[in-house]
Amino acid sequence: MSATGSTLLRPRLLGRTTVNAVVLISVLYTLLPALWLVLAASKDRDALFGSDLLSLSDFSFAQNLRDLFAMDGGQYGRWYLNSLLYAVLGAGVGALVSVACGYAFDKYRFRHKEKLFGLVLAAVMVPQTVLALPLYLMASQAGLVNTFWAVFIPVLFNPFGVYLGRIFSQGYVPDEVLEAARIDGAGELTAYVRVALRMLGPGLVTVFLFQLTAIWNNFFLPMVMLSDQDLYPVSLGLYQWNSSATVSPEYYPVVIMGSLLAVLPLVLAFILLQRFWRGGLTAGAVK
Amino acid sequence: MTATTTQHPLPASAPPSAAPVVDRRARKAARRRQLTACGVLMTPFFALLVTVFLIPVGTAVYLSFYSDDQPGLGFGPERTVFVGLRGYGAVLTDPTFLAGLGTVALYCLIYIPLMVVGALALALLLDSGVVKLRAWAQLGLFLPHAVPGIIAALIWLYLYTPGISPVIDLFARADITIDFLSVHTVVPSIVNIALWSNLGYNMVVFYAALQAVPREVIEASVVDGAGPVRTALQVKTPLVRASIVMVAIFTLIWALQLFTEPMLLSQSSPVINSRFSPSMYIYDAAFTRNNYSLAAAASVVLLLCTIALSYGVTRWTSRADAQEVR
């Protein structure tokens, strides 16, 4: 009996091992380059070009960190603050605007509603690179090129956030609750701010997080709009430094260290807010 | 997606009242209040939609039909002349633009199937229930999504650079010389960067959809004698079709915009020229050559390609759905 049991089990055990091996290899594929970034950030320039990445003999993490913030008169710190400002403020305002609109799409009836919603969905499809030149020309006519606003205003626009907001509103805000608020004599906007927005909290965090990632990643728009290095976000600054590194290799260690620091806020945000975005992805995936 | 329009009853669902006039008036007032609130909630978003979406798209189309003699709008008297489709003719006969389109087509053909199949396979494996430390595996796979695109490109650029890269060292130890940035390997190398960045994200999307599959359906297929592989491929996969289509379309839209990775790699590789992809062509035409009508025409062509392909994918999958039902 045990013999037949083991022959039955063997293929299943084999399958189990294969499945775990495939997942392990995939995880190594995603983690090892990140690990390389951490190790490389602790090397000085000579050790970086020498192959031995794991030796701890020439450990210069602190030195690289100091160099990073001293390079070019402390530009990096400035870029970092710019990025934080663009991303946190932009995602905050953007998420509020999108979710409010999505909520209105869900809870109110008006003519041509679905056509208007179709327009919002169509906006998701349009490539950023298509909009860049007209946006640049508009900004230059308004005298906004090479200012904070030239980057900040376009990134507020998040049509996918409206789509998510509508789905969250359907899922989290029952019509009866609004009904009750109305019977209690609350105005429509009061009901939204006091009752609905609280229930939409997790959805709002999800939209915020997606938009935070998008703005932090944003590279094309700042590249088009900004020429003043003091306004650069980290992404554009590192691009600039990397192009200098091809000529003067002392930039390599600071580019690597700068990349490592630029990754940290998003990794932290994703780990801390896991509960929310996992729920958000479910809402987006299950139509 | 849009089949979700439940009709919401108006708040004052008229009870049979002794004073119908008063009631109707109250209802009208309530309706007006609601429309006002709706307007207030929607206005900020639609103001953005008009300024950073509708007007720019309109401007791009307008610019593509006109040519400006003086580069740099706003200086001196503008002499814009209507040139009709000449801009489009110039773009579509420009071999560098066509080469860019070809590059992106090749990129899409390699990248999209790999991405969809890879992410779905990983999600099915994780959903099978035999993976150890599942939550950790998911987090590890998802991590690259938190790495900005430009930094992902930087990391891989270094991993592709001889002298710095431990990967090339490893190959060298096995007596294999490999050049990741040669004419033939550069597109696969860029695919690898994109795959690394987005595989985990799409895996989580599929995994979330798989979690929503009713457990009874899976139990029923197991009772019917289907093994885990058949259950995954013939029961679970068709049930998450909507997510597959969504991931495919979003991946396609992003892939067509290919810009960040080749832009960064071009700093170190002579193989990538400044018009490697249509987006790079647009950037080069607009901001290096200051040829706005050419850039606008190229933008509109890219936009039309995006719309046509997304529409094609949607139609194709919905027709496949219809056939399945039959």
Image (cartoon, rainbow, N blue to C red):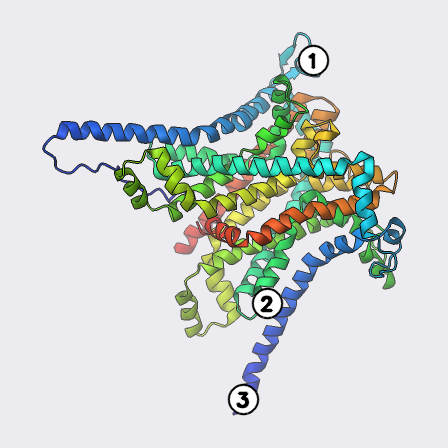
Residue A105 visible in image: no
Mark linked to residue A134: none
> For numbered disc 3, what is the local secondary structure?
helix
Q: Are marks 2 and 1 on the same chain?
A: yes
> For numbered disc 2, what is the local secondary structure?
loop
Residues at discs 2 and 3 in contact (Cβ within 8 Å): no
Label 1 amino acid? Asp
Could you say which quadrant of the image residue B273 lies in? top right
Q: CA distance from mark 2 to mark 3?
A: 30 Å
Left or right: A129 in relation to B263: left
Label 2 amino acid? Leu
Q: Decide which of B280, A44 is in the foreground and name it.
A: A44
Task: Give the residue at x 59% y 81%.
Answer: A10
Task: Report the residue marked by disc 2.
Answer: B133
Could you say which quadrant of the image residue B95 lies in? top right
The relative height of residue B6 versus residue A1 in the rendered view (above or below) is: above
Could you say which quadrant of the image residue B172 lies in? bottom right
- Chain under disc 2: B
Mark linked to residue A4: 3
Q: CA distance from mark 2 to mark 1?
A: 64 Å
The relative height of residue A80 versus residue B177 in the rendered view (above or below) is: above
The relative height of residue B206 versus residue B90 in the rendered view (above or below) is: below
The tally of labels here is 3
> Where is residue B201 shown, x and y percent of the image?
58, 52
Task: Report the residue marked by disc 1.
Answer: B69
